[in-house]
Amino acid sequence: MLNSIRQKLFVYILTLISFVTIGAGIISTFELQKYFRAQLSRQMRTQIELIEFILKTPPATPPIYQYLTTYATSSHFRLTIINDAGLVLFDSKVPQDSLIFVENHGNRPEIRQAGEMGVGSDERLSRTINTGLFYLAIKIHSTLQSRHAFPSARYIRLSIPLQDIDEMMAAVQRKIIASGFIAFLIVACLSYFFSRRITDPLVKLTQIAEKIKHGGYDSGFSFETNDEIGQLSKVLDEMLRKLRDDVIQMDRLQKVRSQFLGNVSHELRTPIFTLQGYLETFLKSPHADEEKKRIFIEKAYKQAERLNMLLTDLIDISRIESGEMKMSFRYFSLQDWLQTLMADFENKARAAEIELALHLNTAMEKVQVFGDRQRLSQVMANLLGNAIKYNKKSGHVDILCKFERGKLKISVADTGPGIARKHHSRLFERFYRVDVQRSRDIGGTGLGLAIVKHIVDAHKGAIKVESVPGKGSTFSFLLKIKGSADRG
Ligand SMILES: Nc1ncnc2c1ncn2[C@@H]1O[C@H](COP(=O)(O)OP(=O)(O)OP(=O)(O)O)[C@@H](O)[C@H]1O
Ligand SMILES: [Mg+2]
Protein backbone atom coordinates (compact mmCIF):
# COMPACT_ATOMS: atom_id res chain seq x y z
CA MET A 1 0.00 0.00 0.00
CA LEU A 2 1.26 3.44 -0.92
CA ASN A 3 0.31 5.98 1.69
CA SER A 4 2.24 9.16 1.37
CA ILE A 5 2.37 11.37 -1.69
CA ARG A 6 6.15 11.22 -1.48
CA GLN A 7 6.12 7.43 -1.83
CA LYS A 8 3.66 7.62 -4.69
CA LEU A 9 5.67 10.30 -6.44
CA PHE A 10 8.87 8.32 -5.96
CA VAL A 11 7.34 5.12 -7.33
CA TYR A 12 5.82 6.95 -10.31
CA ILE A 13 9.16 8.51 -11.18
CA LEU A 14 10.93 5.16 -10.73
CA THR A 15 8.45 3.43 -13.02
CA LEU A 16 8.89 6.19 -15.56
CA ILE A 17 12.68 6.06 -15.56
CA SER A 18 12.60 2.23 -15.69
CA PHE A 19 10.56 2.45 -18.86
CA VAL A 20 12.79 5.16 -20.26
CA THR A 21 16.07 3.34 -19.53
CA ILE A 22 14.78 -0.02 -20.76
CA GLY A 23 13.35 1.62 -23.88
CA ALA A 24 16.53 3.56 -24.48
CA GLY A 25 18.56 0.36 -23.97
CA ILE A 26 16.51 -1.59 -26.48
CA ILE A 27 16.54 1.17 -29.08
CA SER A 28 20.26 1.86 -28.70
CA THR A 29 21.10 -1.86 -28.88
CA PHE A 30 19.03 -2.22 -32.02
CA GLU A 31 20.53 0.88 -33.61
CA LEU A 32 24.04 -0.12 -32.64
CA GLN A 33 23.49 -3.55 -34.10
CA LYS A 34 22.37 -1.97 -37.38
CA TYR A 35 25.33 0.39 -37.37
CA PHE A 36 27.66 -2.45 -36.49
CA ARG A 37 26.41 -4.63 -39.36
CA ALA A 38 26.70 -1.74 -41.81
CA GLN A 39 30.22 -1.01 -40.61
CA LEU A 40 31.11 -4.68 -40.95
CA SER A 41 29.73 -4.95 -44.49
CA ARG A 42 31.68 -1.87 -45.43
CA GLN A 43 34.89 -3.33 -44.03
CA MET A 44 34.21 -6.64 -45.76
CA ARG A 45 33.60 -4.87 -49.07
CA THR A 46 36.92 -3.10 -48.71
CA GLN A 47 38.51 -6.47 -48.04
CA ILE A 48 36.82 -7.94 -51.12
CA GLU A 49 38.09 -5.05 -53.26
CA LEU A 50 41.56 -5.69 -51.91
CA ILE A 51 41.26 -9.39 -52.73
CA GLU A 52 39.99 -8.53 -56.20
CA PHE A 53 43.09 -6.43 -56.67
CA ILE A 54 45.29 -9.29 -55.45
CA LEU A 55 43.58 -11.63 -57.93
CA LYS A 56 44.27 -9.26 -60.80
CA THR A 57 47.94 -8.87 -59.83
CA PRO A 58 48.85 -12.12 -58.07
CA PRO A 59 52.31 -12.35 -56.39
CA ALA A 60 54.96 -14.56 -58.03
CA THR A 61 55.56 -16.60 -54.92
CA PRO A 62 54.15 -18.39 -52.95
CA PRO A 63 51.43 -20.14 -55.00
CA ILE A 64 48.23 -18.12 -55.07
CA TYR A 65 46.13 -20.75 -53.26
CA GLN A 66 48.53 -20.86 -50.31
CA TYR A 67 48.93 -17.06 -50.34
CA LEU A 68 45.18 -16.43 -50.15
CA THR A 69 44.66 -19.11 -47.46
CA THR A 70 47.29 -17.51 -45.21
CA TYR A 71 45.88 -14.05 -45.89
CA ALA A 72 42.31 -15.11 -44.94
CA THR A 73 43.35 -17.06 -41.84
CA SER A 74 45.49 -14.23 -40.49
CA SER A 75 42.60 -11.78 -41.12
CA HIS A 76 40.11 -14.07 -39.33
CA PHE A 77 37.70 -14.54 -42.20
CA ARG A 78 36.78 -17.20 -44.67
CA LEU A 79 37.27 -16.43 -48.35
CA THR A 80 35.49 -18.26 -51.16
CA ILE A 81 35.86 -17.68 -54.90
CA ILE A 82 33.09 -19.01 -57.12
CA ASN A 83 32.64 -19.08 -60.90
CA ASP A 84 29.57 -18.37 -63.02
CA ALA A 85 28.32 -21.93 -62.74
CA GLY A 86 28.50 -21.87 -58.95
CA LEU A 87 31.61 -24.00 -58.81
CA VAL A 88 33.94 -23.25 -55.87
CA LEU A 89 37.38 -22.29 -57.23
CA PHE A 90 38.91 -21.40 -53.90
CA ASP A 91 37.98 -21.75 -50.25
CA SER A 92 40.30 -20.68 -47.43
CA LYS A 93 38.89 -23.44 -45.20
CA VAL A 94 39.19 -26.21 -47.79
CA PRO A 95 42.53 -27.58 -49.09
CA GLN A 96 42.95 -27.30 -52.85
CA ASP A 97 42.85 -31.03 -53.45
CA SER A 98 39.52 -31.41 -51.62
CA LEU A 99 37.72 -28.76 -53.71
CA ILE A 100 36.11 -31.37 -55.89
CA PHE A 101 34.09 -32.56 -52.88
CA VAL A 102 32.62 -29.13 -52.21
CA GLU A 103 29.04 -28.87 -53.43
CA ASN A 104 27.89 -26.29 -55.96
CA HIS A 105 27.41 -22.84 -54.36
CA GLY A 106 25.29 -21.31 -57.15
CA ASN A 107 22.11 -21.61 -55.08
CA ARG A 108 23.46 -19.96 -51.94
CA PRO A 109 21.20 -16.95 -51.13
CA GLU A 110 24.06 -14.41 -51.02
CA ILE A 111 25.40 -15.66 -54.39
CA ARG A 112 21.98 -15.54 -56.02
CA GLN A 113 21.42 -12.07 -54.62
CA ALA A 114 24.88 -10.93 -55.82
CA GLY A 115 24.08 -12.38 -59.27
CA GLU A 116 20.97 -10.24 -59.44
CA MET A 117 22.09 -7.06 -57.69
CA GLY A 118 25.89 -7.13 -57.57
CA VAL A 119 26.00 -7.53 -53.77
CA GLY A 120 24.44 -10.21 -51.55
CA SER A 121 24.50 -11.08 -47.86
CA ASP A 122 23.16 -13.79 -45.58
CA GLU A 123 23.43 -15.20 -42.10
CA ARG A 124 23.24 -18.95 -41.57
CA LEU A 125 24.90 -22.15 -40.47
CA SER A 126 27.58 -23.18 -42.94
CA ARG A 127 27.10 -26.74 -44.10
CA THR A 128 30.63 -26.81 -45.39
CA ILE A 129 32.36 -25.99 -42.11
CA ASN A 130 29.42 -26.33 -39.66
CA THR A 131 29.44 -22.92 -37.88
CA GLY A 132 27.11 -19.91 -37.91
CA LEU A 133 28.46 -17.37 -40.43
CA PHE A 134 27.76 -13.97 -41.86
CA TYR A 135 28.26 -13.91 -45.62
CA LEU A 136 28.91 -11.06 -48.01
CA ALA A 137 29.30 -11.80 -51.73
CA ILE A 138 30.20 -9.47 -54.58
CA LYS A 139 29.94 -10.08 -58.31
CA ILE A 140 33.12 -9.15 -60.20
CA HIS A 141 33.35 -8.24 -63.88
CA SER A 142 36.83 -8.09 -65.29
CA THR A 143 37.93 -11.67 -65.80
CA LEU A 144 39.60 -11.21 -69.13
CA GLN A 145 43.02 -10.24 -67.75
CA SER A 146 45.81 -12.60 -68.67
CA ARG A 147 47.51 -12.55 -65.29
CA HIS A 148 44.28 -13.19 -63.33
CA ALA A 149 44.78 -15.89 -60.69
CA PHE A 150 41.30 -17.34 -61.27
CA PRO A 151 40.28 -16.22 -64.75
CA SER A 152 36.80 -17.74 -64.47
CA ALA A 153 36.13 -16.21 -61.03
CA ARG A 154 32.70 -14.51 -60.90
CA TYR A 155 31.94 -14.10 -57.18
CA ILE A 156 34.15 -13.24 -54.26
CA ARG A 157 32.56 -14.15 -50.98
CA LEU A 158 33.77 -13.26 -47.48
CA SER A 159 32.33 -14.72 -44.34
CA ILE A 160 33.07 -14.27 -40.70
CA PRO A 161 31.76 -16.41 -37.81
CA LEU A 162 28.54 -15.06 -36.25
CA GLN A 163 30.00 -15.98 -32.91
CA ASP A 164 32.56 -13.21 -33.23
CA ILE A 165 29.89 -10.68 -34.10
CA ASP A 166 27.65 -11.87 -31.28
CA GLU A 167 30.49 -11.64 -28.78
CA MET A 168 31.18 -8.10 -29.78
CA MET A 169 27.50 -7.23 -29.63
CA ALA A 170 27.19 -8.85 -26.20
CA ALA A 171 30.09 -6.75 -24.94
CA VAL A 172 28.40 -3.60 -26.21
CA GLN A 173 25.09 -4.68 -24.69
CA ARG A 174 26.74 -5.27 -21.32
CA LYS A 175 28.10 -1.75 -21.43
CA ILE A 176 24.66 -0.36 -22.29
CA ILE A 177 23.04 -2.28 -19.44
CA ALA A 178 25.72 -1.19 -16.97
CA SER A 179 25.48 2.47 -17.93
CA GLY A 180 21.68 2.23 -17.93
CA PHE A 181 21.78 0.81 -14.44
CA ILE A 182 24.09 3.57 -13.21
CA ALA A 183 21.84 6.21 -14.82
CA PHE A 184 18.86 4.54 -13.18
CA LEU A 185 20.49 4.71 -9.75
CA ILE A 186 21.45 8.35 -10.15
CA VAL A 187 17.97 9.34 -11.32
CA ALA A 188 16.37 7.27 -8.55
CA CYS A 189 18.44 9.10 -5.89
CA LEU A 190 17.65 12.47 -7.46
CA SER A 191 13.95 11.69 -7.69
CA TYR A 192 13.93 10.68 -4.04
CA PHE A 193 15.27 14.09 -3.09
CA PHE A 194 13.02 15.90 -5.54
CA SER A 195 9.91 14.15 -4.27
CA ARG A 196 10.98 15.13 -0.75
CA ARG A 197 11.38 18.71 -1.86
CA ILE A 198 7.89 18.66 -3.33
CA THR A 199 6.20 16.97 -0.41
CA ASP A 200 8.07 18.59 2.50
CA PRO A 201 5.98 21.81 2.33
CA LEU A 202 2.84 19.67 2.29
CA VAL A 203 4.04 17.83 5.36
CA LYS A 204 4.70 21.17 7.04
CA LEU A 205 1.25 22.47 6.05
CA THR A 206 -0.32 19.38 7.57
CA GLN A 207 1.62 19.83 10.80
CA ILE A 208 0.48 23.44 11.09
CA ALA A 209 -3.12 22.48 10.34
CA GLU A 210 -2.85 19.81 13.03
CA LYS A 211 -1.63 22.45 15.51
CA ILE A 212 -4.55 24.71 14.61
CA LYS A 213 -6.96 21.81 15.03
CA HIS A 214 -5.81 21.64 18.64
CA GLY A 215 -6.43 25.35 19.19
CA GLY A 216 -3.08 26.87 18.19
CA TYR A 217 -4.71 29.75 16.34
CA ASP A 218 -1.60 31.91 16.51
CA SER A 219 0.38 29.69 14.12
CA GLY A 220 0.45 30.76 10.46
CA PHE A 221 0.95 29.06 7.09
CA SER A 222 3.29 31.62 5.54
CA PHE A 223 5.15 29.96 2.64
CA GLU A 224 6.99 32.54 0.60
CA THR A 225 6.85 30.51 -2.62
CA ASN A 226 5.02 31.43 -5.80
CA ASP A 227 3.84 27.92 -6.61
CA GLU A 228 0.54 26.19 -5.86
CA ILE A 229 1.63 25.43 -2.31
CA GLY A 230 2.43 29.09 -1.75
CA GLN A 231 -1.02 29.99 -3.04
CA LEU A 232 -2.66 27.33 -0.91
CA SER A 233 -0.89 28.60 2.19
CA LYS A 234 -2.00 32.14 1.38
CA VAL A 235 -5.63 31.00 1.12
CA LEU A 236 -5.29 29.00 4.33
CA ASP A 237 -3.79 32.02 6.09
CA GLU A 238 -6.76 34.11 5.05
CA MET A 239 -9.12 31.40 6.25
CA LEU A 240 -7.26 31.25 9.53
CA ARG A 241 -7.51 35.01 10.01
CA LYS A 242 -11.28 34.80 9.51
CA LEU A 243 -11.48 31.84 11.83
CA ARG A 244 -9.57 33.76 14.50
CA ASP A 245 -12.00 36.68 14.19
CA ASP A 246 -14.92 34.27 14.32
CA VAL A 247 -13.54 32.68 17.44
CA ILE A 248 -13.13 36.09 19.09
CA GLN A 249 -16.68 37.01 18.03
CA MET A 250 -17.99 33.70 19.34
CA ASP A 251 -16.17 34.17 22.64
CA ARG A 252 -17.72 37.62 22.98
CA LEU A 253 -21.19 36.36 22.10
CA GLN A 254 -20.74 33.54 24.57
CA LYS A 255 -19.79 36.05 27.26
CA VAL A 256 -22.75 38.31 26.42
CA ARG A 257 -25.08 35.33 26.46
CA SER A 258 -23.93 33.98 29.80
CA GLN A 259 -24.02 37.51 31.22
CA PHE A 260 -27.58 37.84 29.93
CA LEU A 261 -28.51 34.50 31.44
CA GLY A 262 -27.01 35.56 34.76
CA ASN A 263 -28.94 38.83 34.62
CA VAL A 264 -32.15 37.04 33.76
CA SER A 265 -31.92 34.60 36.64
CA HIS A 266 -30.98 37.42 38.98
CA GLU A 267 -33.94 39.47 37.81
CA LEU A 268 -36.30 36.55 38.18
CA ARG A 269 -35.05 35.60 41.61
CA THR A 270 -36.02 38.88 43.25
CA PRO A 271 -39.77 38.86 42.47
CA ILE A 272 -39.98 35.10 43.08
CA PHE A 273 -38.38 35.42 46.53
CA THR A 274 -40.55 38.36 47.43
CA LEU A 275 -43.65 36.54 46.24
CA GLN A 276 -42.60 33.48 48.24
CA GLY A 277 -42.01 35.67 51.30
CA TYR A 278 -45.48 37.25 51.22
CA LEU A 279 -47.21 33.93 50.69
CA GLU A 280 -45.19 32.33 53.49
CA THR A 281 -46.08 35.13 55.92
CA PHE A 282 -49.67 34.80 54.86
CA LEU A 283 -49.66 31.04 55.56
CA LYS A 284 -47.89 31.45 58.88
CA SER A 285 -50.36 33.98 60.25
CA PRO A 286 -53.76 32.28 60.04
CA HIS A 287 -55.17 34.56 62.73
CA ALA A 288 -54.38 37.87 61.07
CA ASP A 289 -57.34 40.05 60.34
CA GLU A 290 -58.93 40.24 56.90
CA GLU A 291 -57.40 43.63 56.09
CA LYS A 292 -53.84 42.40 56.73
CA LYS A 293 -54.47 39.26 54.68
CA ARG A 294 -55.78 41.40 51.84
CA ILE A 295 -52.59 43.48 51.90
CA PHE A 296 -50.42 40.34 51.75
CA ILE A 297 -52.37 38.96 48.83
CA GLU A 298 -52.22 42.31 47.06
CA LYS A 299 -48.44 42.51 47.47
CA ALA A 300 -48.03 38.92 46.27
CA TYR A 301 -50.22 39.76 43.30
CA LYS A 302 -48.01 42.80 42.47
CA GLN A 303 -44.92 40.55 42.44
CA ALA A 304 -46.65 38.03 40.20
CA GLU A 305 -47.57 40.89 37.88
CA ARG A 306 -43.99 42.10 37.84
CA LEU A 307 -42.83 38.58 37.07
CA ASN A 308 -45.29 38.41 34.22
CA MET A 309 -44.05 41.73 32.83
CA LEU A 310 -40.49 40.64 33.07
CA LEU A 311 -41.20 37.40 31.26
CA THR A 312 -43.13 39.19 28.51
CA ASP A 313 -40.21 41.57 28.01
CA LEU A 314 -37.71 38.72 28.00
CA ILE A 315 -39.71 36.78 25.44
CA ASP A 316 -40.02 39.93 23.32
CA ILE A 317 -36.34 40.70 23.40
CA SER A 318 -35.26 37.15 22.66
CA ARG A 319 -37.73 36.98 19.77
CA ILE A 320 -36.42 40.27 18.39
CA GLU A 321 -32.78 39.26 18.77
CA SER A 322 -33.22 35.84 17.20
CA GLY A 323 -34.99 37.49 14.28
CA GLU A 324 -38.16 35.57 15.02
CA MET A 325 -40.26 38.69 15.43
CA LYS A 326 -41.47 39.79 12.02
CA MET A 327 -42.54 43.36 11.48
CA SER A 328 -45.39 44.19 9.16
CA PHE A 329 -44.91 47.66 7.75
CA ARG A 330 -47.79 49.72 6.39
CA TYR A 331 -49.05 53.30 6.32
CA PHE A 332 -51.34 54.42 9.10
CA SER A 333 -52.76 57.72 10.39
CA LEU A 334 -50.45 59.48 12.83
CA GLN A 335 -53.27 61.33 14.55
CA ASP A 336 -55.42 58.27 15.03
CA TRP A 337 -52.50 56.31 16.41
CA LEU A 338 -51.34 58.93 18.92
CA GLN A 339 -54.86 59.63 20.11
CA THR A 340 -55.41 55.94 20.83
CA LEU A 341 -52.17 55.91 22.81
CA MET A 342 -53.24 58.99 24.73
CA ALA A 343 -56.51 57.31 25.70
CA ASP A 344 -54.54 54.32 27.01
CA PHE A 345 -52.16 56.43 29.11
CA GLU A 346 -54.42 59.15 30.42
CA ASN A 347 -55.50 57.13 33.44
CA LYS A 348 -51.99 56.03 34.24
CA ALA A 349 -50.76 59.62 34.10
CA ARG A 350 -53.61 60.88 36.21
CA ALA A 351 -52.93 58.20 38.83
CA ALA A 352 -49.28 59.34 38.97
CA GLU A 353 -50.41 62.95 39.07
CA ILE A 354 -48.60 63.72 35.84
CA GLU A 355 -50.00 65.95 33.18
CA LEU A 356 -49.88 64.19 29.82
CA ALA A 357 -50.35 66.24 26.65
CA LEU A 358 -50.31 65.54 22.92
CA HIS A 359 -49.24 68.44 20.70
CA LEU A 360 -50.46 68.03 17.13
CA ASN A 361 -50.87 71.04 14.82
CA THR A 362 -53.32 70.97 11.92
CA ALA A 363 -50.54 70.17 9.43
CA MET A 364 -50.20 66.79 11.12
CA GLU A 365 -53.86 65.80 10.85
CA LYS A 366 -53.56 64.03 7.51
CA VAL A 367 -50.08 62.61 7.96
CA GLN A 368 -49.66 58.91 7.25
CA VAL A 369 -46.61 57.35 8.86
CA PHE A 370 -44.99 54.12 7.74
CA GLY A 371 -44.19 51.26 10.09
CA ASP A 372 -45.47 48.42 12.24
CA ARG A 373 -48.19 50.16 14.23
CA GLN A 374 -48.35 47.58 16.99
CA ARG A 375 -44.58 47.53 17.57
CA LEU A 376 -44.43 51.34 17.45
CA SER A 377 -47.17 51.42 20.09
CA GLN A 378 -44.90 49.24 22.19
CA VAL A 379 -42.12 51.82 21.70
CA MET A 380 -44.36 54.67 22.75
CA ALA A 381 -45.69 52.67 25.71
CA ASN A 382 -42.14 52.20 26.97
CA LEU A 383 -41.16 55.81 26.46
CA LEU A 384 -44.39 57.17 28.00
CA GLY A 385 -44.11 54.64 30.85
CA ASN A 386 -40.58 55.80 31.62
CA ALA A 387 -41.53 59.46 31.31
CA ILE A 388 -44.36 58.96 33.81
CA LYS A 389 -42.33 56.70 36.11
CA TYR A 390 -39.20 58.82 36.19
CA ASN A 391 -40.80 62.20 36.72
CA LYS A 392 -41.17 64.69 39.50
CA LYS A 393 -44.30 65.26 41.50
CA SER A 394 -46.95 67.02 39.37
CA GLY A 395 -44.64 66.87 36.41
CA HIS A 396 -45.44 67.00 32.72
CA VAL A 397 -45.10 64.58 29.82
CA ASP A 398 -45.42 66.00 26.31
CA ILE A 399 -45.70 64.20 22.99
CA LEU A 400 -44.34 66.42 20.22
CA CYS A 401 -44.28 65.96 16.44
CA LYS A 402 -42.34 67.84 13.79
CA PHE A 403 -41.01 67.35 10.27
CA GLU A 404 -37.32 66.77 10.01
CA ARG A 405 -35.21 65.79 6.98
CA GLY A 406 -38.25 64.54 5.09
CA LYS A 407 -39.38 62.42 7.98
CA LEU A 408 -41.56 62.87 11.03
CA LYS A 409 -39.83 63.25 14.38
CA ILE A 410 -41.74 62.08 17.44
CA SER A 411 -40.47 63.15 20.86
CA VAL A 412 -41.52 62.23 24.37
CA ALA A 413 -40.36 64.91 26.83
CA ASP A 414 -40.62 64.73 30.61
CA THR A 415 -39.80 66.96 33.56
CA GLY A 416 -38.02 64.23 35.54
CA PRO A 417 -34.55 64.09 37.09
CA GLY A 418 -32.86 63.77 33.72
CA ILE A 419 -30.07 61.36 32.81
CA ALA A 420 -26.39 62.20 33.19
CA ARG A 421 -24.43 62.18 29.94
CA LYS A 422 -22.24 59.22 30.93
CA HIS A 423 -25.28 56.93 30.92
CA HIS A 424 -26.52 57.89 27.46
CA SER A 425 -24.45 55.40 25.54
CA ARG A 426 -25.42 52.46 27.74
CA LEU A 427 -29.04 53.39 28.36
CA PHE A 428 -30.32 51.12 25.60
CA GLU A 429 -28.48 48.02 26.82
CA ARG A 430 -30.51 45.23 28.32
CA PHE A 431 -30.94 45.45 32.10
CA TYR A 432 -29.12 48.77 32.22
CA ARG A 433 -30.53 51.06 34.85
CA VAL A 434 -29.31 54.46 35.92
CA ASP A 435 -30.41 54.01 39.50
CA VAL A 436 -30.83 50.29 40.08
CA GLN A 437 -32.67 50.45 43.38
CA ARG A 438 -35.08 53.20 42.41
CA SER A 439 -35.87 51.54 39.09
CA ARG A 440 -36.55 48.23 40.83
CA ASP A 441 -38.73 49.85 43.40
CA ILE A 442 -40.79 51.43 40.66
CA GLY A 443 -41.09 48.05 39.03
CA GLY A 444 -38.76 48.38 36.01
CA THR A 445 -36.88 45.47 34.49
CA GLY A 446 -34.36 47.51 32.53
CA LEU A 447 -35.44 45.87 29.25
CA GLY A 448 -37.80 48.57 28.04
CA LEU A 449 -35.28 50.79 26.22
CA ALA A 450 -33.46 47.77 24.78
CA ILE A 451 -36.73 46.69 23.15
CA VAL A 452 -37.39 50.28 22.04
CA LYS A 453 -34.00 50.47 20.35
CA HIS A 454 -34.48 47.18 18.51
CA ILE A 455 -37.87 48.21 17.15
CA VAL A 456 -36.80 51.74 16.20
CA ASP A 457 -33.67 50.37 14.51
CA ALA A 458 -35.86 48.05 12.44
CA HIS A 459 -37.66 51.22 11.27
CA LYS A 460 -34.32 52.98 10.66
CA GLY A 461 -35.67 55.56 13.08
CA ALA A 462 -32.46 56.49 14.98
CA ILE A 463 -33.55 56.64 18.64
CA LYS A 464 -31.97 59.58 20.48
CA VAL A 465 -31.94 60.89 24.02
CA GLU A 466 -31.37 64.46 25.12
CA SER A 467 -31.35 65.41 28.74
CA VAL A 468 -30.60 68.25 31.11
CA PRO A 469 -30.02 66.72 34.57
CA GLY A 470 -32.48 68.16 37.03
CA LYS A 471 -34.73 69.49 34.26
CA GLY A 472 -35.89 66.47 32.29
CA SER A 473 -35.26 64.09 29.38
CA THR A 474 -36.47 63.89 25.80
CA PHE A 475 -36.46 60.65 23.81
CA SER A 476 -37.05 60.98 20.07
CA PHE A 477 -37.07 58.95 16.87
CA LEU A 478 -37.96 59.39 13.19
CA LEU A 479 -40.67 57.80 11.07
CA LYS A 480 -41.09 57.66 7.31
CA ILE A 481 -44.14 59.50 6.01
CA LYS A 482 -46.24 59.31 2.87
CA GLY A 483 -45.21 61.76 0.16
CA SER A 484 -42.16 62.84 2.11
CA ALA A 485 -40.55 64.49 -0.93
CA ASP A 486 -42.74 67.63 -0.89
CA ARG A 487 -42.15 68.34 2.78
CA GLY A 488 -38.36 68.25 3.11
N1 LIG B 1 -37.44 59.36 31.10
C1 LIG B 1 -36.44 58.95 31.90
N2 LIG B 1 -35.94 59.77 32.83
C2 LIG B 1 -34.96 59.38 33.65
N3 LIG B 1 -34.40 58.16 33.60
C3 LIG B 1 -34.87 57.30 32.70
C4 LIG B 1 -35.89 57.65 31.80
N4 LIG B 1 -36.12 56.58 30.99
C5 LIG B 1 -35.28 55.63 31.38
N5 LIG B 1 -34.49 56.02 32.38
C6 LIG B 1 -33.44 55.28 33.04
O1 LIG B 1 -32.99 54.28 32.13
C7 LIG B 1 -33.14 53.00 32.70
C8 LIG B 1 -33.52 52.02 31.61
O2 LIG B 1 -34.83 52.25 31.16
P1 LIG B 1 -35.70 51.03 30.67
O3 LIG B 1 -36.98 51.57 30.15
O4 LIG B 1 -34.87 50.24 29.78
O5 LIG B 1 -35.91 50.19 31.98
P2 LIG B 1 -36.97 50.32 33.14
O6 LIG B 1 -37.88 51.45 32.85
O7 LIG B 1 -36.20 50.37 34.41
O8 LIG B 1 -37.73 48.97 33.05
P3 LIG B 1 -38.86 48.52 32.03
O9 LIG B 1 -39.02 49.65 31.06
O10 LIG B 1 -38.31 47.32 31.43
O11 LIG B 1 -40.05 48.32 32.84
C9 LIG B 1 -34.15 53.14 33.75
O12 LIG B 1 -33.95 52.22 34.76
C10 LIG B 1 -33.91 54.57 34.25
O13 LIG B 1 -32.90 54.55 35.23
MG1 LIG C 1 -39.00 51.47 30.92
Image: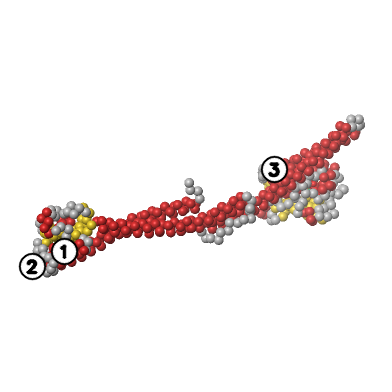
Q: Residue 438, how many percent across, how many down?
A: 84, 47
User: Viewed as shown, does residue 39 lie left or right of 447?
Assistant: left
Q: Of the two numbered discs 3 and 1 on the same chain, state the one appearing first in sequence.
A: 1
Residue drawn at (18%, 56%) of the image: 110
Distance from the alpha carbon under mark 2 to that under mark 1: 19 Å
Position of the C terminus by quadrant: bottom right
Distance from the alpha carbon under mark 3 to that under mark 1: 121 Å
**Mark 3 beta carbon near ligand 1 (under 8 Å):** no
Question: How many residues crowd mark 2 within 10 Å: few (<14), some (14–19), many (20+)?
Answer: few
Residue position marked by numbered label 2 in the rendering? 146
Q: What residue type is labelled 3?
A: Arg
Distance from the alpha carbon under mark 2 to that under mark 3: 131 Å
Residue position marked by numbered label 3 in the rendering? 319
User: Viewed as shown, does residue 186 lie left or right of 153?
Assistant: right
Residue in the foreground of this view, choosing between 298 and 212: 212
Q: Is residue 448 visible?
A: no
Residue in the foreground of this view, choosing between 372 and 48: 48
Q: What element carries label 2?
A: loop
Residue drawn at (20%, 65%) of the image: 46
Q: Can residue 51 be seen in this view?
A: yes
Residue drawn at (63%, 53%) of the image: 217
User: Which of labels 2 and 3 is toward the front?
Assistant: 2
Q: What element carries label 3?
A: helix
User: Viewed as shown, does residue 76 lie left or right of 288?
Assistant: left
Q: Of the two numbered discs 2 and 1 on the same chain, state the one appearing first in sequence.
A: 1
Residue in the foreground of this view, choosing between 15 and 471: 15
Residue position marked by numbered label 1 in the rendering? 68
Q: Please report contact status of discs 2 and 1: CB closer than 8 Å, yes or no.
A: no
Q: Which amino acid does label 2 sit on?
A: Ser
